Image (cartoon, rainbow, N blue to C red):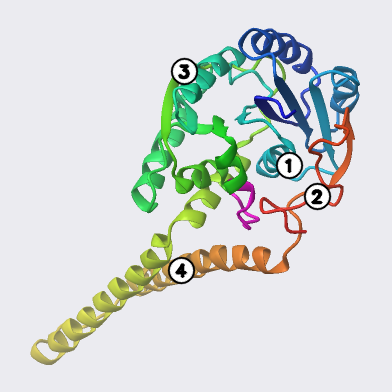
Amino acid sequence: MPPTLSVVIPVYNEEATLPELRRRLGEVLEQIEPSHEVILVNDGSRDGTAEALGRICAPGSRWRGVHLSRNFGHQAAVAAGLRAAAGAAVVVMDADLQDPPELVAELLAKWREGYEVVYAQRVSRQREGWLKRTLAWGYYRVLRAVAPVDIPSDTGDFCLMDRKVVDALVALPERNAYLRGLRAWLGFRQTAVPFERKARFAGEPKYTFRKSLSLGINGIISFSKKPLRLATWLGLVVSAVSFLLGIYFIILRLTSEFEIRGWASTVVIILFLGGVQLLTIGIIGEYLSRIYDEVKQRPQYVVRGEDNAPEGGKAVRRSGGSVGGQA
């Protein structure tokens, strides 16, 4: 009999956090939904996370561990967990306790009201610098402006999805999956639950600025063609300005004794045009790199092993797979 609720948690170097996560989330789940399972996806951790999962995911418990063969990234780990989840409703959350386990009760309540996607929406961020908060605020507004679908602002992967939504999500063939965007793209009945994002319980943030920037670029490239059109418009504007300036200087030369001189202005113009060209090539390169990844058809992750794997239940394929399960 499949559980009513599955909780998917990607884990990377969270040895210090796992005991508290086990305690808090376990208490919440026992109170709100006895029929549950928790799937912890070890995304190639280098500390004692694997051993800690072995202790937490003991045989006969409702906790399962999935170990990827190396670090494939947060989105790939979430995809592996979604593929393993068997619940009628599936919650995705982080292991660092910035996503409070107590909020799962509110997500589940909204699902029982009939909503098929319930996402947690941040109203504040504790112990995060003003620069990170400002960049995050600006990014979500830019993403909403350029994306053809309405991707809610200030939301991450912390959410609850109905079984039909999860099945539709894992059936998508994309390798460079931006899950919070795909969640919005799928549609269904969606609603938000506001919450305050807490500080990490222990350890250092695993999502560095570089990783956050990469994820942000992936979100924009995955859901909008407008960067390509920006490159087109830049080319048209620069060409038009150059053409008009050329005509202006020809007229000026024929109608006056004005002498055009100055190497500094020439260098500035050349550098400006070179910058526009490199920017355009870079934008095209981002799209080509994603086409290249999709054409290779490599699996999104590879599973090394599992703790407390279900007998006759839903397990993760040993060969791994993409969001769509194509190996």
- The image position of residue 10, as x and y in percent, is 71, 32
Secondary element under disc 3, as helix, strand or loop, is strand
Taking 8 as reference, is 27 above or below it? above
Q: Amino acid at mark 3?
A: Phe
Instruction: List the single residue furthest toward the bottom.
Output: 254
> Do tag 3 and tag 4 residues touch (Cβ < 8 Å)?
no
Of callouts 2 and 1, which one flags the residue occurring earlier in the amino acid sequence?
A: 1
Q: Are marks 2 and 1 in contact (CB under 8 Å)?
A: yes
The amino acid pointed to by label 1 is Ala
- Name the residue: 63% across, 35% down: 208
Return the mark for residue 195.
3
Res. 198 visible in picture: no
CA distance separating discs 1 and 3: 26 Å
Give the mark toward the camera: 1 or 4: 1
Residue 320: give its label.
Answer: 2
Q: Which dot, 2 or 3, sits closer to the camera?
A: 2
Q: Nearer the viewer, residue 181 or 138?
A: 181
Tell me the mark number nearer the camera, choosing from 4 and 2: 2
Give the quadrant of residue 32.
Answer: top right
Which badge, 1 or 4, comes first in the chain's sequence? Answer: 1
Q: Are marks 4 and 2 in contact (CB under 8 Å)?
A: no
Q: Which mark is residue 280?
A: 4
